[in-house]
Structures are given as C-alpha cells and as structure tokens.
Image (spheres, rainbow, N blue to C red):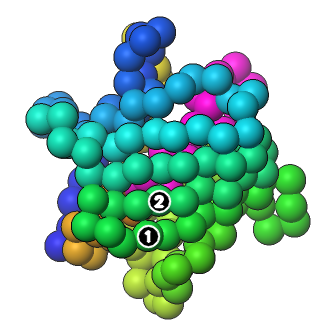
Amino acid sequence: MKQALYLQQGKEPNGSLFLARDPGGGLLYRLDGPRDSLTLHSRFLLLYSAGRQRARILRVGLTDMSVYELRLDTGQRLRVVRQHATRKGGLLFQGKNWRFRGSLETRCFDIVENSRVRMTHAPCWQGECGFCYGLTLDGEEPDHLFCLCAAMIADSAAVLPGRCPLPV
C-alpha cells in the first residue's frame, strides 16, 4: 500500500518536533519529545492525530552518532544507527533488511529493501512553518511507521547552511 505524506518541522517552542500531514493538509502524526540535543539519552513519542501513541523512539548518543530504538505499539522493534561522520554516512538498520540510499546533507534519500523502495524522501519547500519534506511510503502500516520515524531521525540532524536541525 502506497501513502504520500508531508513532514514538517515544528516551529513552536513547546510544540511538537515534527508534524506529518496528508496531501490535503490534514494532521496524521506528530512527534513529541525534548528539544535538548546535548543529553546522551532521550525519549520521543510518535502520536496519531487523536493522541494515541503509535511508536516510541529511544535515543542513546549525540545527534552525529546515535543509536535509536524504535518500538511500535504492536511490539515490533527496529534499531537505527545514525552515523553522520563515517564514509558511508546515513542510517544503518538492524532488524530489517533495509539500506539507506542517498544523502543526509541534501535530505534526498530512499530506504530500500532488496530492490524495493520502501520510502522516498525529498525537500519540498521552506515557508513560515519551517522546512517541509515529501515522503512516499510503500508497504504495510508497520513499515510506514518505521520509515516515518527514520525520516524524522534523519531530518533532525542533517545540517545544511542556513538550516537549523531539531535535536531528535
């Protein structure tokens, strides 16, 4: 099942870190958690628009080199290693046969399983509400949620001139 989303960085000081919207602008998910990137351990919640928790993200490490444990409300887990300073750069996935293809710097990337693209991600625009990214997700709902969390992890720490990353 394919799904298109727009992912926006939150702008409110005490608001959500990210908002995921459908193509019509309706709120689907939000990511809540601390904005302090200097701690070595943080917890974030991916909430459905009605407030129901769909996933929990636990981070250990700093934003340039961190390990994230993604836990869905169904009990499924995925570990994501964010490694910005290595030769391969990007995200490593443990628990699925996924690989990262593209660039964290430009925020243009895919998540690929064998030859099947699970997610495409690219910048769309920058406006009053911050940066917005277009995502196309393929697969079942658990894969959609894992991909959405991975996109939020990538967008929180990729730095381009003039951009201000959020500390997820």
Residue 78 lies, in percent from the top left, at 49, 69
Does the CB distance between marks 1 and 2 fall below 8 Å? yes
Q: Residue furthest bottom?
A: 114
> At 72% across and 31% down in the image, what residue appears?
39
- Specify whether residue 121 is in view: no
Q: Amino acid at mark 2?
A: Leu
> At 32% across and 69% down in the image, what residue appears?
75
Q: Is disc 2 placed on a helix, strand or loop? A: strand
Give the extent of the magenta segment.
148-168
Tell whether 14 sits left or right of 67: left
Quarter of the image where one finds residue 11: top left
Q: Is disc 1 placed on a helix, strand or loop? A: strand
- Specify whether residue 72 is in view: yes
Depth check: 52 or 144 in front?
52
Q: Amino acid at mark 1?
A: Arg
> At 67% across and 62% down in the image, what residue appears?
81
Where 147 falls versus 118 (above or below)? Answer: above
Circle on res. 70: 2
Which residue is tagged 1? 77
Residue 122 lies, in percent from the top left, at 48, 49
Depth check: 158 or 73 in front?
73
Where 95 falls versus 13 (above or below)? Answer: below
Circle on res. 48: none
Based on the picture, tell me whether residue 1 belongs to the magenta stretch: no
Residue 108 lies, in percent from the top left, at 56, 53
